[in-house]
Amino acid sequence: MIPPGHFMVLAEVLPGHEPALRELLARMNSGPGQADPDNPLLPFGRFEGLHFLRIAILDDATHDDLAAHGVAPTPLPTYLSFFGDCDGPGGDQLDEFAHVAPDGLLQVFAHCVACPPRAGLAAWLRARDLPVAAAYANWTGRTARRVREERAIAEALARRVRLLGSTEPGQLQALRVQLLAFVTAEREQGRLLVTADPPTPLGWWLRNLAHVVAIPLLGLVALPLLLLYSPLFIWQLRRRERADPEMVQAPDPAHVAELATFEDRGITNAFTALGSVKPGRFRRWLVIVLVALLDYAARHLYGRGHLTRVQTIHFARWVFIDDKQRLLFASNYDGILESYMDDFINKVAWGLNLVFSNGVGYPRTQWLVQGGARNSQGFKNYLRRHQVVNSVWYKASPGLTAMDLARHGRIRAGLERTAMSDREIEDWLRSM
Amino acid sequence: VSAPVDFSDVQGLLRFGYKHHTESAFALLRVHNRAAARAWLAAAQVGSAAKGPLPPTVLQIAFSAPGLRELGVPEPVITGFAPEFVAGLGTDPNRARRLGDVGNNDPAHWQWGGPSEPLLPHVLVMVYAMPGRLDACCLALESHWAVAFELVRWLPTTDMGGVEPFGFTDGISQPEVDWSRELPAEDHDSLAYRNLSCLGEFVLGYPNEYGRYTVRPLLEPVGAAALQLPRAEDAPDRADLGRNGSYLVLRTLRQDVPGFWRFLDAQAGGDSAERQRVAEAMVGRRMDGQALVAPEAVPVQGVGQDAAARAQNGFTFDADPAGLRCPVGAHIRRANPRNADLPPGTQGLVARAVRMLGLDSAVLHGDAVASVRFHRVLRRGREYGQRISLAEALARPVAPVETGLQFICLCADLARQFEFVQGAWIAGSKFAGLPHEGDPLMGNRLAAPDEPDTARFTMPREGCPSRVIDGIPTFVDVVGGAYFFLPGLRALRYLATA
């Protein structure tokens, strides 16, 4: 198994360079925000193990919201963020970018402070690669290559089944044998591929196991302390939940219109949002702990086609920036934003509340999980206000939802079964 | 205790379908002379939702955002309405893309309501009349409007006896509105599908399914006109311009009846029973309105308990997850998937927590869409044009037939209700995890940039592969549309006099 990797280069934009940078980024696109896979600056389509990539200028329009907490907002730089999801370590992917497309990258990062030298480009990128605080991959170990291979198998089988026409009931086993023979023949001809995964890197496997064990162990060790602390914690939390200012006013229509221009160009969309963590040590530590738990759940509890009840997210990440003063959330999701936000509100409001209620202006929560996103209009306003335009967004497998990918996986898995009951064959055929 | 609804302040359309008023026509007007327009609007006799003897004719009045501007409503009041209403239905290419209003449905080609200014209505006057009373009423109105308004067009309707142009019984599934305010105004999970909706889902100024008040303009209660307005329940020091009003979506949907039946006839190889079976699978109901799945054993809240009501509306799709009886992509299943806040299962605390965390993999597949109670609309559409029989539709050559639906729906939150259902469920090409198909009736069949083929419909079958119908042509084109605000009666007076 090749574990998923993530990278995120964050570089400060040189003052006054933003317009030129935006113009340059637009040249990578075939439509508003939609990356051209063959663009000469950074031909995304050439990278075998790349799933998603985006380039966004992080200008935080809500930074001044901090003033509502009685804190004078300190000026923060505008960043160029360059981030994505890939197979294997994110650092290796950055090396490959630097190797394949140094000229394009140099042109882009020339607009940033301490722009990279040609010789040390890879090291420069790696030095600015921020760690993710929490990462979610829809299916751990599903490589971009496997996505392509499974798509080809699923499409070929779907065509084959329809070619065979209206089979009479009761012929399921015979039909399956026919389909298996078809795939075997296609594989022999080299028209369909099923590449076996390389063994899971031992280091990753050990680190993963250690993580599985360490976090609950840490919790167990800290339990007596946590129990002692809990009355004080509840008092601290409830006091803040009652007093923290909400900033859920309607977003600027012009901002929403700009965001909408970049949305719904295909079935999958990219969401990037940025906001300040509420000032003070309590919220800072709370969000650090909760994001760590979220990372634990995303890595070990989910990663098999769904994050809690939400099945439309391909990749998501939570990243602290500026010494944990700000939190960035980014995801690749299927469908229109309205339905994505409604999934948040109706399926997993409690989960969003846990993390984002530590952000400035979030709709009021009760007991960390109640309320919050359930103020649906306020929550939608909050998201839109914090959302950032993605100047460039690349998706390796356009037209496929996360549910399609899971379906293709089931179709492929069906080929590997030695025997199937009639009922299982029915389900298998339906997934085509 | 919640205050009872003042029906005399609510326009009748929110409560009634005016089924005895079999004749109707909808006037799209532009304000020509502001003073005269305001005078006519202030004096107009608009039918309320209070019950009483049936009047021979009824007027209902609604405004577009440009209409409010034209009448002199101040800009800060207008921007207090939902942003979707302020922006309008047919003027924003991003909205059009989201709603599937592209290709044939592109607002640029619309007969009315598109981006071209002269076709953008300001005021919608809906006239409902008892048999034989419509024409005289419309003529009288036109003479009254001579100075005040310019008539963009009349949208005619035809009484097709409760059957839409393709021949299916229509208007069966409607949410039951909680007029008596029995449902608690609070936010808690709904564990069974119910057909009873909070008042605030359709009428502004009341709590919605989240127990909250939807945005609408709240005004300083100063000036004679504003003092007439009801106070806001959630802000008693403010006058509530939205209270007892609603948003109204009107879309003219042209239906290609010969195209529909001739395509199905070809699919069925001329077999009339098979032709009807496929058509019913696409719609998700029998032509007479019967559901394709059996009614639930436990009554659905908000559905009448008589056998007819239960057979037509007392069902969910819980027992048919694969769509063997009613295909998952069928039109009515897309428009209302009839589910609860959690996937079906036992109600124990642990079992619920497992489903809430998404850890019950057995129910996940059916959980792609959920919580339909936030996505209901109240439909008040009427058919228009020429009704043709099945035999006429199948006859060759077919003379061009102009027929379809003046689709009307009412809701309190355009984004979460109408736009969600239309954008995510009807126009979406990946509904409930289906690989690639649009709505079998309404789909625009266009290839999205990354979606080469949406012109399909899948009918799962028992014991053999699904039947896939592809190359489906468009059967329904959008040829006009706009968003309106249907005010309460006191709000109407405010808009006409303030």
Image: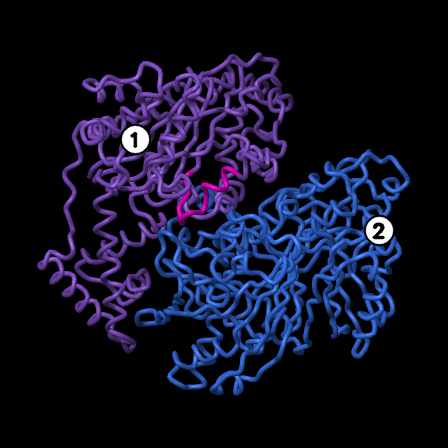
Chain colours: A purple, B blue
Q: Do the residues labelled 1 and 2 touch (CB within 8 Å)?
A: no
The location of residue A243, given as percent across then percent down, is: 64, 21
Residue at (50, 59) in percent of width and height: B426
Q: What residue type is labelled 2?
A: Arg
Work out which residue is located at the far right of the displayed protein and give it: B224
A48 in the magenta segment: no
Q: In this image, A42 relative to B94: left or right?
A: left
Q: Is residue A247 above or below residue B3?
A: above
Q: What element carries label 1?
A: strand
Q: Indicate the chain on which mark 2 is placed.
A: B
Tags 1 and 2 on a common chain: no
Whether residue A318 is visible, yes or no, is: yes
Badge number at residue B38: 2
Crowd around label 1: few <14 · some 14–19 · many ≥20 (10 Å) = many
Q: Quadrant of the C terminus of chain A?
A: bottom left
Q: What residue type is labelled 1?
A: His
Label 1 to label 2: alpha-carbon separation: 61 Å
The location of residue A416, given as percent across then percent down, is: 18, 55
The location of residue B408, given as percent across then percent down, is: 65, 61
A260 in the magenta segment: yes
> Which residue is more in the foreground, A350 or A123?
A123
Quarter occupied by residue A17: top left
Badge number at residue A6: 1
Q: Is mark 2 on a helix, strand or loop?
A: helix
Residue at (36, 35) in percent of width and height: A298
Residue at (73, 36) in percent of width and height: B76
Q: In this image, A382 relative to A27: left or right?
A: right
In the image, the segment drawn in magenta is A258-270
